[in-house]
Image (spheres, grey):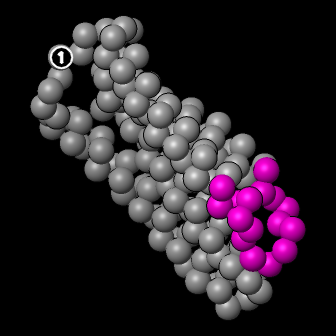
Amino acid sequence: MNNSFKENYHWVTLISIVLIYGYYFVKVLPPSGPDITAENVTLFAGLLVLLVVLHIVGAIVLIAVAKFNDPHPDERDQLVNLKGSRNASWILTTGVFAGMAAVLLAPGNFWVLHILLASLVVSQLVESATQIFHYRRGF
């Protein structure tokens, strides 16, 4: 494993988010009504706890498998983080505007909340994927 800790951790983030939120959206779509249900909230809370556990376990495994020695981010890490955050902010901004449109167009709160959640999830995926791309590219 010759990748940096940050690159490997972005892989953990990317895979865990795709699996956890992919499962969530498969379970709750299509909606059974215009509002979210208690089952949706319970499922979300349980999967959120699982996501946190996966991130913690992933970090522990990465640290245990290889001794990473990069405690301070260098200029390259800062530039990669900046590029990832920039791309993610565009997705999140677009999602917020879509959520605002859903407030005006869709009855209930189901679509508003899930559009906002989806934009948050997609923005995190874009951020991690962008950072992985730049680490792989050797930026």
Query: In percent of the image, x 49 and y 65: which residue is there?
Result: 92
Q: Is residue 133 visible?
A: no
Q: Position of residue 27 (x, y in %)?
A: 79, 50
Query: In percent of the image, x 78 and y 57: which residue is there?
Result: 28
Q: Is residue 86 left or right of residue 98?
A: left
Image quadrant holding the C terminus, namely top left
* Looking at the image, residue 31 lies above or below residue 62: below
Query: In percent of the image, x 41 and y 62: which residue is there?
Result: 89
Which of 50/106 is in front? 50
Query: The magenta stretch spans which residues?
Result: 27-42
Q: Position of residue 1 (x, y in %)?
A: 38, 9
Label 1 neighbourhood size at 10 Å, few (<14), some (14-19), many (20+)? few
Q: How many marks?
A: 1
Q: In the orientation shown, which residue stands out farthest toward the bottom?
A: 104
Secondary element under disc 1, as helix, strand or loop, is loop
Q: Position of residue 13 (x, y in %)?
A: 47, 36
Quarter of the image for residue 95 reads bottom right
Q: Is residue 86 visible?
A: yes
Quarter of the image for residue 130 reads top left
Q: Position of residue 48 (x, y in %)?
A: 54, 47
Whether 83 is among the magenta residues is no
Whether 36 is among the magenta residues is yes
Hey, what amino acid is under mark 1?
Asn
Residue under pointer 1: 69
Q: Is residue 108 left or right of residue 75?
A: right
* Looking at the image, residue 99 lies above or below residue 86: below
Q: Is residue 67 left or right of residue 95?
A: left
Query: In percent of the image, x 47 and y 34: which residue is there?
Result: 53
Which of 117/82 is in front? 117
